[in-house]
Every structure is written in structure tokens, then in C-alpha cells.
Amino acid sequence: MHTIGKNRRVLLLVALASAAGAQDTGPLKLTLRDAVGLALKQNPQVILGNLGVAMSEQERLVARSALLPQLAGNVSETDNRVNLQASLGLPIPGFPQHVGPFQVFQAGARFNAPVFDLTLWRRYREARFGIEANRAQETTVREQAVELVVSQYLGSQRAAADVEAGKSRVDLAQALYDQAADLQKNGVGTGIDTLRANVQLQNEKQRLIVAQTELQTSLFGLARLLSVDPRRTIELADQVSFFETPPVSADATLERAYTTRPELRQNLNEQQRAQLELRSAGDERLPRVSVMGFWAEQGLEPNSAIPVYQYQASLDVPLFTGGRIAAQRAEADLAIRQLKQQEQDLRDRIALEVKTALAQLEAARNEVTVANLGIDLARQEVEQARDRFQAGVANNIEVITSQDELARANDNQIAALYRYNQSRADVAHAIGQMEALYVK
């Protein structure tokens, strides 16, 4: 009975595992916010950035430990045999050549502590600035990961919008073809009208196939960015948001970008760290004061051990370093100058990105307004041309022409909406607010 119950449990676990595996291969529906959150959890570069911050934290603790007293315990028992003649450099009449073997037992502690050493203090402060620099680097990596995912997701939304527009155009072309065929059947229309409508229908079907392929390949690219299991398919869960044009935050300014861009904050932290390295190199000319010593119970055996100790204070004064200190100061000064040049380049690039993104956003907003009006007019043109053809006032050349105009208006609207959404993301990237906009 025990074996039967155990087998049942094993079969149940296997069934649950199989069900979980089958569930994992199903479609994965993601909103834009979900996709960004998943990327920030699974992106390898983001993980490396987190590890870099953790390592810099440990480096700070190592630098801090050098400022604190160090204490070590020791217990030893040794066998000794000493050559007196070799130790003294000459034989002594009446004394044996060697002493021992004898045992020495010792148990105690050693310590050392810096009293005055500015270089150790500078290194500790450098490690603290190193943490801030790594945090800024991590933020930069996160912003870049969000930027890639948002751009790919928006591209997938655009491709999905093209598919939906293509389906609508196929349905319209099918209806117009049926209309032309009915008119020809009733002796009102002509064969050339039906032929034109059929050609237009096949063209729209071909466009739909191309749009569907573009959507599939775009979703494949999104899955690659998110490190999703290749067996799973991705479905867009918030296609409606693509057609929205939310306003951009009022603080999208150049001053805001200078404050929040992580690359600039990283550069400023690196400059502060280089300044400390310059001071630390100069501080190596100063004397260093430290104390050390040990205390132990020592004897030929534990029962005969007595306290022994040695305490020592030392003052080290650098007299000649072979030019090392001057070279270190020159190296640190060059690093500061290099970082300042990089800062200026960063500020110029940020200014260009902010101004360009804002200009493109304003243009995209106007394009959306014009495109929405254009698609309304194109739909009216199709309806009027269809009515004229139905009434026999004109052939379906006007209908085919209006279909092409509607297709062009659809493409213009989708392209304008994509540019607006992408420009909005570009503004967020330019001011260092990608994660704040698409995650929080």
C-alpha cells in the first residue's frame, strides 16, 4: 500500500509538471508596461548592472576595513633546535653547539591599527563615489533596455495596426467586388468594372499578407529582447493605446535633462572620484602613524606559560619614491581633464537630443491631426464613389481610386501615430525618464 501511494504521488507530480510545461508554451499577452517590466527582470545587461553595484558596495566595505583596527588570534606549539654557534657566529667554550630540541607553546592575539593615514581615508571616499557611479551606470543600462523594448513594442503595435487596416480594406474590397459582380449580373455593370474590383481585392489581400508577416517578425524580435521561451508566442494586450496621443510632461526641458540623465550623473561622480585620487596621491607625501603589537601566553608547555607582549608605534616618512607620487598626481589630473571634456560633450549631445525630440514630437502631433482628417475625408470619398457607381452615374474607376486614397490615408494615420508614440519615447529618453514613464 505504501508503494502504491508513493507511485500515485509521483504520477501526480509528473502530471502537474506536464500541465505547467504545457501552460508555459501558450501565448503570452503583454501590455507595454508588462513588456518593460519583464525586460528589466530578465535582460542580461540589467543583471550585470545590478551586480556591478553590489561589487562596488563590497569594495567600499573593503576600503572601510583598512581604517579599522585589525585583530587576529593565534595558538601555536613548535619544536625548536637551535645551533648556538651559527646563531652567535662563534663557538663559546663550555657551551654545547646546539640547544634543544624543546617545545614552545604560545596562545594570544596580534593587532595593528592606523592612527594617521590620509590615503586610506581618501580611498574609502573614492569607493563611496564609485558606488554612485555604478548606480548611475546601472540606471543608464536600465534606460537603454527600456528604450529598446518600447521601440520594438511600438513597432509591433504599428504592424498590428497595419494588419487591422489591411483586414478592413480587404473587407471593403470584397464588398465592392460583390457590388460590381451583382451589377454586372443584373445587366447594369460591365465586365471591366468587375475585373477592376477583383484586381483591387487581390492587391489588398497581398498587402494584408505582407502586413501579417511584418507583425510576426516584429513580435519575434520583441520575444528576443525579452528572453522569452522561443516556443511561446507574444500577443499585444493594449493595441488601443497606440491610437491615443497622451500629452508629454511639462518638465521635459533641457534643465530637467541635465539633472536626471544618468550618463551625466555618472560623469560627475567619476570627476569627484578623480579629484579624490589626485588628493590621495598628494597625501602620500605625508607621514603615516600606526600602532601594532601582540600579547600572548608563552611557555615550554601550557602549564608553565607566562604573559609576554610587544607593543610598537611607528612613524613612516616617505623620503624618495622615484617620481611615483608626481606621476600619480599627473595621471589623476589628466583623468580629470578628460572627464571634463566628456562632460561637455555629454551636455552638447543631451541638448541636441532634447531639442530634436521636442521638435519631432510637435511635428508628429500635427501630423496625427492632419492624418485623422485625411482618413475621414477618404472614407467620405469611398462612400460617395460607391453610391455614384451603384446609381450608374459613373464606372468603378472612381471607386478604385478612392480605395487607393483610403489605403494611403490609413498608412499616413498609422505612420503619424507611430511617429508620435516614438517621439514621446524619444523625449522621455532625452530627459532620462524612460523607466519613470513606462514602468512606474
Image (cartoon, helix red, strand yellow):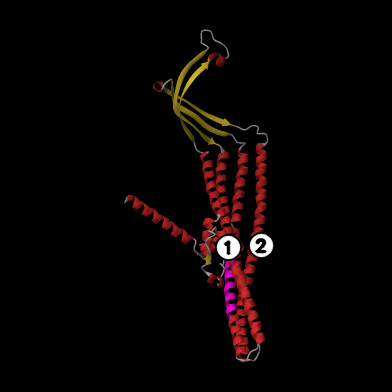
Name the amino acid, label 2.
Leu
Q: Give SS at disc 2.
A: helix
Where is residue 110? Give x, y as percent.
Answer: 48, 30
Q: Give SS at disc 1.
A: helix
User: In which quarter of the view is residue 414 placed?
Assistant: bottom right
Does the stretch in magenta take in 168?
A: yes
**Mark 2 sits on what residue?**
352
Does the stretch in magenta take in 274?
A: no
**Mark 1 sits on what residue?**
220
Please state which of residues 126 and 155 is positioned toward the viewer in this rendering: 155
Determine crowd level at label 2: few under 14, some 14-19, many 20+ residues with C-alpha closer than 10 A. Answer: few
Where is residue 212? Give x, y as percent.
Answer: 59, 70
Please state which of residues 319 and 146 is positioned toward the viewer in this rendering: 146
Please state which of residues 41 and 214 is positioned toward the viewer in this rendering: 214
Where is residue 346? Give x, y as percent.
Answer: 65, 56
Name the amino acid, label 1.
Phe
Q: Main secondary structure of the magenta part?
A: helix
Where is residue 245? Give x, y as percent.
Answer: 56, 72
Against 306, residue 433 (above or below) is below
Task: Give the magenta-colored segment's residue range.
Answer: 147-172
Determine crowd level at label 1: few under 14, some 14-19, many 20+ residues with C-alpha closer than 10 A. Answer: some
Residue plotted at (63% across, 43% down): 278
Any part of residue 420 in sight? no
Any part of residue 65 in sight? yes
